Amino acid sequence: MAASFYKSTRSSDLNITSSEAIVKGLAHDGGLYVPKEFPIIEKSFDELMDMNYRELAFYIMKKYFTDFEDKELLQCINSAYDEKFDSKNIAELIECSGVYFLELFHGPTLAFKDMALSILPYLLKTASKKQNIKKEIVILTATSGDTGKAALEGFADVDGIKIIVFYPEDGVSEIQKRQMITQQGKNTSVIGIEGNFDDAQNGVKEVFADKEFNNTINEKGYIFSSANSINIGRLVPQIVYYFYAYLKMLREGKIAEGENINIVVPTGNFGNILAAYYGKEMGLPVNKLICASNENNVLHDFISTGIYDIRREFKKTISPSMDILISSNLERFLYELSSKDEKLINKLMKNLKETGKYEITQDMKEKLKDFYGGYVDDEKTRETIKDVYEKSNYLIDTHTAVAYAVYKKYKKETKDEARTVIASTASPYKFTRSVMEAIDKSIEDHDDFHLIKTMSNLTGLNVPKGIKDLEKKEILHNKKCKKNEIKKVIADILD
Ligand SMILES: *Cc1c(COP(=O)(O)O)cnc(C)c1O
């Protein structure tokens, strides 16, 4: 079997197995682990069509986690995709308003992050056993709101693992924050940082890259790993649902075998859309990958010009999980665009660090044409929620609305009629205030928790169990820190 399936985006000589890549998270040269080659789908869609979510997950993940035994991988999958999802299909596909909404929010924390973070703890435990790791694993996570809770939920009370989450104190929704600070589990720590998501993510990345600090921690019996989408164990499980959606459309006769579809993804760290791109490289028939942004539109500009430039104001929007200027996973995409040119990746990343921008080559710009980038502001996002609700009686959250609005723009510009899947990344229940404000201006003085009930009354849908009684839960975490204190906080927790 392919012993070393992964390598770093920044060096040609860091070759490792999947279990090693999952344990390490980030490569020591600062690069991200990528597969040396994309595995391909050798079965016909006809053969795949009748698989359920777990079976398909096994078929796809097995191609990436090559040093896992069948039995091990099956156990990970079966432990992850079970009754904690409130849909027995795990993901639902809803045809509505001329598109297919791929609902990825049926997991315990009501956001698509559950699709990968419900399995990552099992992958990590298995991987660390395979790697014969005796040290305690410390998961460091920066979150723009949803990763934090999904990771806490996944890792709470898992033996031999601690988890520390940093979130931007004023950059998440009231419900997102409450979900995190009420987290139970002796091995969990949650810290609000004074700064935005990029500050949190940069701080955590620096910890990974700091050899000296890592040595000190190792001596104390710990090693760091990551639950962010820089971990390949996060990315791979996300490929599954794009195939799942395609096969479902095929099964229901919405598309013909081999017909290309568009996929629209509301994007922040470029993880979810990268998974769709990996799917395409494996043989998923995709016409356009549509990258939707809010007013933090650095990716839109990049896709239109080939210039990535973060020197701009960071904006707080009503789709906070996408309030990001430095999209980590873009590095994996650049690596593929450059035909695996590690030297170039080093140069681009150095430029980004030193000057706040980089420009890709002409050749890479040509290949970017598979993508379309668009963005909308908060006003347009609200209008879209209202419009879909009034026309179709279907309530979407702010992130999904950004995606749908960008798709409408795309369709108007291009007249493209290809069937289109919209990644629905969160339940409207996670962003009750913004969603309710969009459809009903009269609710302004109610708090976010009261609005949960209002939303339920309005839609006739039951309140998802993940946020039921959230308001009454005891607050267990109230630590805060400045952005330059991350290392110190970690050291204190581990002391
Ligand atoms: C994380 C998140 C996104 C962005 O996904 P990326 O993989 O970071 O691009 C979009 N919507 C919601 C609701 C999220 O939680």
Image: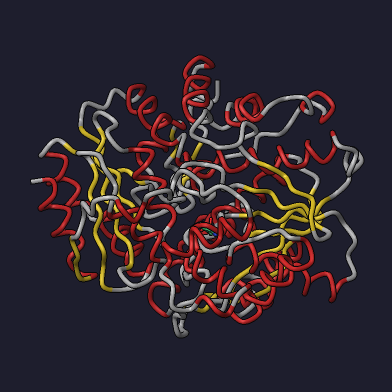
Query: Would residue 41 be found to the left or right of residue 186 on screen?
Result: right
Q: Nearer the viewer, residue 303 or 36?
A: 303
Q: Residue at x 60, y 47 (%)?
A: 104
Q: Residue at x 37, y 41 (%)?
A: 153
Residue 35 shows up from this direction:
no
Residue 42, image x, y percentages: 76, 27
Query: Would residue 442 be found to the left or right of residue 159 on screen?
Result: right
Residue 478 shows up from this direction:
yes
Position of residue 167 relative to residue 25, above or below, is: below
Q: Nearer the viewer, residue 156 or 206?
A: 156
Query: Would residue 349 be found to the left or right of residue 40 on screen?
Result: left
Residue 384, image x, y percentages: 69, 72
What is the quadrant of residue 297 in the picture? bottom right
Q: Residue at x 71, y 56 (%)?
A: 422
Q: Nearer the viewer, residue 81 or 48?
A: 81
Residue 358, image x, y percentages: 52, 75
